[in-house]
Each structure stands twice: as C-alpha cells, then as structure tokens.
Image: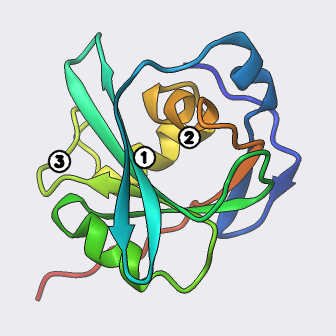
Amino acid sequence: MTARPEPFFSWTARRVELDELRESESAVLVLDEVVPVGAGTARLIATRDEDTDIDYLALIVGDVADGHDIAVRGVDEEALLIEGSRTASSPEILIGLRAAQSICGCSDARHVDSQLCLDGPIRTMIASIGVRSVVVDWYHVISAVA
C-alpha cells in the first residue's frame, strides 16, 4: 500500500480524493441493492477482497454521485440498516464493522481508516460508486477497560 497526498488534513479527520482511483480501476460489487431506511431509501453495496477473502459492506445514504467531502463512518455491521435510518447527515457512507479484530490485529475502525487513506478494497469500492472525495475520522477514542 502506498500513501497518497492529501489536500485536507485536520487533527481528527482527513479528506481523501478518489477521482484518480475512480478513473483507473473499479471494484466488482458482489451486492448492489436499494433498501428502505427510515422514510427514504439507501444503497447497500458489498465487495470481496480476493486476496484475503474478506467481504466489505457499505450503506450509501443520500445521493453521493459526484459528491465532495462525503462523511464516512464505521458502524457495527449488524446494525448497519438501523444506523442508516437514524443518520442525521445526508449524504453519508456507513461502513459495516465486524465485532472481531481485522487481519492486521488493529481495531476494525482503524483498519477501515487505513483502507480509505491508503490503497485498499474499501477505497476502491467507494470510488466505484462515483464519489469524488470523502472525509474520514482519523482519531478514535480508545476506551479504557476498568
């Protein structure tokens, strides 16, 4: 994986440009369905990373085609549709997080962040739906175990 230059950086978030990736390659979506959430509809998409046989799931709330600075956040995979119906900001992209740790041994939220900011299947999946740039939280509070 190689890092790409980022035009926007803050202490807690990064802006990730997807225009170049969108033109050079696209993900093969194994799932692309319109689903009802709350009073509206959303798009549920999934892709499979052939190298690791891991599936990635995302819920697209609102119209993200040609969108800039679309918020991306991770939510529990089992509550993806529920969280999508509760979303306060539209458009937004929700990435399904598994309860188990990712293959790199880090938390799934940090794994999703690195997939977006570096090359990875999540970045390719989101670029394939027509988003120009996303904003991803880069800082996650780690809760202390008492």
The residue to which callout 3 is attached is: 101
Tags 2 and 1 touching, CB below 8 Å: yes
The residue to which callout 1 is attached is: 112
Q: In the picture provided, is 46 more to the left or to the right than 131?
A: left
Name the residue at 35% across, 67% down.
36
Going by the numbered disc 3, the residue's amino acid type is Gln
Going by the numbered disc 1, the residue's amino acid type is Val
Name the residue at 57% across, 25% down.
119
The residue to which callout 2 is attached is: 116
How far apart marks 2 and 3 lie (CA) works out to: 17 Å
Name the residue at 19% across, 52% down.
98
Name the residue at 76% across, 17% down.
23
Going by the numbered disc 2, the residue's amino acid type is Leu
How far apart marks 3 and 1 lie (CA) works out to: 11 Å
Q: Residues within 10 Å of mark 2 (few under 14, many from 20)?
A: many
Q: Nearer the viewer, residue 130 or 78?
A: 130
* Vertical position of residue 69 compared to residue 19: above or below: below
Q: Label 2's element?
A: helix
- Disc 2 versus disc 3: nearer the observer: 2
- Disc 3 versus disc 1: nearer the observer: 1
Residue 14 percent location from the top left of the image: 70, 56
Residue 118, picture quadrant:
top right
